[in-house]
Image (cartoon, rainbow, N blue to C red):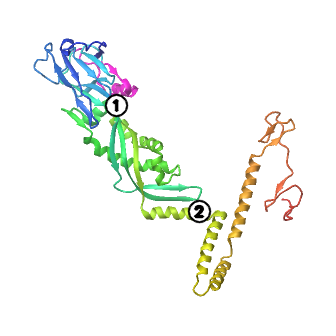
């Protein structure tokens, strides 16, 4: 048995003039995943007793955009068609597969679990036509009932902590292999199979997959509030996590996710902020600016001291002396570090001119192959570049 694609004008007249029986399906809305094909019987049909589970030879079958039709015989899939058009059912031909946009995957599935041509042209006793909704099933809302661990990593400031996040949003999926979905999920149905029948299971598995997906995002050193801006990376991670259960078992594919918000407990948010504040103090210039600001505030407070401004300033001076360091020292330290970093960067990127006139950056000239001349310069521990045997700044001996 098989399907023969009808000509473009096959539906030009009435259905009764073209086929004995005709199967079709109205547009499927977003809540319907599978529906049983409705049969329209003409006066030419030999199926006069009205058995809906028998398809007469020569019947017509229509498939619309966004649909995939399968014919099931005795509980086994014998025909698949995901290509829009009108087709004639021929019980004497081999099974045919019109894969359409579903591609090679559904063909491989049919070869594995589909029923081959075994009746020699005779139809079975139970035949059904089912239509699958292959459009994207959107607006599946989710929310995490329990916090999900998220590792916050920032190598620049040495931060590596686990926090708890909650999130909510919507996701979408689509049926990409109707044979697997029929075999492992819906089976034979009398009327239709709605998404509410599988929604709870999919939502639970989706939320469970968020944890390994968030783990991959943390490798990018993202903060929790940056998750919503990295949908592409999150979708790829979710596909990796869900492929085995959804794709290989049920014939479903996760398509997209839109996260509305990501929240974390106040104590976790404060811990991250405190780590950022502490990291700022590692930069002497930033520490100097913070100290200078604190000293300015202290001077304002000292000026309003009830015991007299002089007493306040004396106390502030004693506190500064006890601290052992002032803003000026920190600014000087920051400038020295910046100068050393700039000098090191210049050394790493500075080129040299070969005797042939070409500029080179490596150890050999790319034009003539001459080796880079050995420089007599050396850098002292104080940061000064020298050419002699002693540092011209501090007098230290050349290493």
What is the span of residues highlighted in magenta in the rendered image?
95-121
Residue depicted at 50% across the width and 54% down the height: 223
**Left or right, 31 with reference to 398:** left
Q: Residue furthest left?
A: 49
Q: Which residue is mark 1?
A: 177
**Left or right, 112 with reference to 45:** right
| Residue 247: x %, y % from top left | 37, 36
| Residue 258: x %, y % from top left | 40, 45
Q: Quadrant of the N terminus?
A: top left
Q: How many marks?
A: 2
Q: Is residue 144 above or below residue 185?
A: below
How dense is the environment of label 1, judged by Cα within 10 Å: few (below 14), some, or many (20 and up)? many
| Residue 278: x %, y % from top left | 57, 65
Label 1–label 2 contact, CB within 8 A:
no
Give the alpha-carbon distance from disc 1 to disc 2, as whole Å.
52 Å
Badge 1 element: loop
| Residue 71: x %, y % from top left | 25, 24
**Left or right, 40 with reference to 87:** left
Residue depicted at 23% across the width and 17% down the height: 60
Q: Which residue is mark 2?
A: 279
Q: Residue furthest right?
A: 388
Looking at the image, is mark 1 or mark 2 nearer the viewer?
2
How dense is the environment of label 2, judged by Cα within 10 Å: few (below 14), some, or many (20 and up)? some
Residue 269 visible from this viewpoint: yes
Residue 1 visible from this viewpoint: no
Badge 2 element: helix
First reached walking from the N terminus: tag 1 or tag 2: 1
């Amino acid at each position: 048995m098989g399907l023969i694609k009808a000509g473009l004008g096959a539906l030009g007249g009435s259905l009764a003039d073209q086929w004995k029986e005709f199967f079709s399906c109205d547009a499927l809305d977003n809540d319907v995943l599978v529906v049983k094909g409705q049969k329209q019987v003409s006066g030419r049909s030999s199926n006069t007793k009205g058995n809906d589970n028998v398809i007469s030879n020569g019947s017509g079958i229509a498939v619309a955009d966004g649909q995939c039709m399968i014919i099931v015989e005795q509980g086994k899939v014998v025909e698949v068609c995901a290509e829009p058009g009108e087709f004639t059912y021929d019980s004497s031909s081999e099974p045919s597969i019109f894969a359409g946009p579903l591609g090679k995957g559904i063909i491989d599935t049919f070869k594995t679990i589909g029923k081959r041509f075994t009746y020699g042209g005779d139809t079975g006793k139970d035949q059904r036509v089912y239509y699958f909704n292959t459009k994207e099933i959107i607006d599946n809302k989710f929310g995490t009932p329990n916090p999900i661990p998220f590792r916050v990593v920032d190598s620049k400031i040495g931060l590596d902590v686990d926090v708890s996040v909650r999130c909510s949003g919507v996701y979408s999926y689509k049926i990409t292999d109707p044979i697997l979905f029929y075999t492992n999920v819906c089976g034979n149905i009398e009327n239709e199979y709605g998404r509410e029948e599988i929604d709870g299971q999919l939502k639970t598995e989706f939320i469970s997959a968020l944890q390994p997906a968030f783990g991959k995002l943390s490798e990018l050193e993202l903060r929790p509030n940056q998750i919503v801006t990295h949908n592409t990376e999150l979708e790829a991670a979710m596909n990796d996590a869900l492929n085995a259960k959804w794709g290989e078992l049920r014939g479903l594919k996760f398509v997209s996710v839109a996260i509305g918000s990501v929240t974390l407990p106040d104590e976790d948010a404060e811990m991250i902020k405190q780590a950022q504040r502490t990291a700022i103090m590692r930069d002497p210039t930033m520490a100097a600016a913070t100290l200078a600001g604190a000293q300015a505030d202290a001077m304002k407070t000292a000026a309003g001291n009830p015991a007299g401004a002089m007493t306040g300033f004396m106390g502030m001076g004693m506190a500064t002396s006890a601290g052992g360091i002032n803003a000026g020292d920190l600014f000087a330290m920051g400038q020295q570090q910046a100068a050393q970093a700039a000098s090191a960067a210049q050394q790493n990127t500075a080129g040299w001119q070969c005797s042939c006139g070409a500029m080179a950056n490596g150890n050999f000239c790319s034009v003539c192959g001459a080796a880079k001349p050995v420089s007599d310069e050396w850098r002292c521990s104080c940061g000064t570049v020298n050419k002699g045997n002693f540092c011209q700044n501090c007098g230290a001996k050349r290493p």
